[in-house]
Amino acid sequence: MSSKIARTAYILVIHKNPEQVNKFVKQLISKEYTDVYIHIDQKNPQLKAKMIKSPRVKVLNKSVAVRWGDITLVDATLLLLKEVIASGISYDFICFRSGQDMLVKKGFAEFLAENKNKIFMNAYRVQKREPHAAFVSVNWPEWSRQLYITPYHPYRLMRRGIAILYSMGVNISPNKYKLPENFSIYNGSNWFCIPLEVAKYIIKFVNKNEWYYEVFRNSLVPDEFFFQTLIMNSKYKNDVVNNNLMYIKFGKTVKTRNNPITLKMDNVETIKNSNEFFARKFDESVDNQVIDYYCKKISM
């Protein structure tokens, strides 16, 4: 294999649209230096039979029921990382994506080869008394961690109120597990691309330090804190490039501003101008044409 190509393991979490997922997977395995590992949401086991059959595509036998806002997405990600490590293959990178993403720009493997040892993820420091820190420092019961679409749903307003109170020094339900004083909290989008060495560090740290997982067990949206905080408090923090290489467009209304919009053909030019290698989210039931457009235009 050329030194100008990075061998990459893609880890995907999926819960619907198997035909769309297979189109994305075909993009990823169009060259010999990539493999794909898939976690299928435990709530939809029937999807396994519909996944593309290839020696370079592995669907995990073990799975969890992923729920918005709690630790289950972290659990699924850890399962995937462990599976890649257990393969014994010397990957250069592990790239975490979802089944609703697409490759939208050529040359990704070459880009990674030029940036070996770099970590591509969003990571923003959260001050310990700003409202966002409440996501980690408050114990959130399961019912409060659910996704409520309506912007003024009482539980969403309640979460906002709890976060504001926390910023004022009032923690009405403290998380009994705390990060060490020398740890800073970091937040960001959960999608990342990390060297295999960093993945091994994550799994080793979590296995040896059970308290770390417990800090996030009852936190709010822990997938946006767990890996960011761990890496940014490690020796790898200087290797982080604050970019997850993903184009995401958020809505502008109160209802949609915290959720990625579904991309359509109308967004192709904007995606191109972003100069990112990946984009999300796509949905075949909304616009299958744009998915086929990138299938034909872009491969590894």
Image: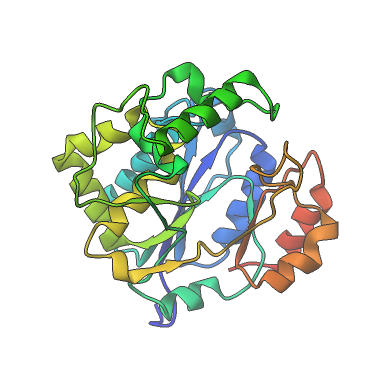
Looking at the image, residue 79 sits to the left or right of residue 73; the answer is left
Q: Decide if residue 88 is in sight here.
A: no
Looking at the image, residue 6 sits to the left or right of residue 238; the answer is right
In which quadrant is the C terminus drawn?
bottom right
Quarter assignment of residue 64: top left
Choose between 261 and 131: the one closer to the eye.
131
Q: Residue at x 45, y 56 (%)?
A: 192
In which quadrant is the N terminus drawn?
bottom left
Q: Residue 215 placed where, x, y %?
A: 28, 34
Q: Residue at x 35, y 22 (%)?
A: 173
Q: Residue 13 placed where, x, y %?
A: 51, 41
Q: Is residue 127 above or below residue 106?
A: above
Q: Is residue 198 above or below residue 226?
A: below
Quarter assignment of residue 103: bottom right
Quarter assignment of residue 47: top right
The image's colour scheme reads: rainbow
Q: Residue at x 63, y 47 (%)?
A: 22
**How many numbered tags mark residues here?**
0
Q: Decide if residue 252 is in sight here.
A: yes
Q: Is residue 52 above or below residue 165?
A: below
In the image as oriented, which residue stretches furthest toward the left?
208
In the image as oriented, which residue stretches furthest toward the front?
168
Looking at the image, residue 219 sits to the left or right of residue 147; the answer is left
Choose between 271 and 123: the one closer to the eye.
123
Q: Residue at x 83, y 53 (%)?
A: 289
Choose between 121 and 83: the one closer to the eye.
121
Q: Residue 115 placed where, x, y %?
A: 41, 77
Q: Residue 15 placed where, x, y %?
A: 58, 33
Choose between 11 and 269: the one closer to the eye.
269
Q: Is residue 132 above or below residue 244?
A: above
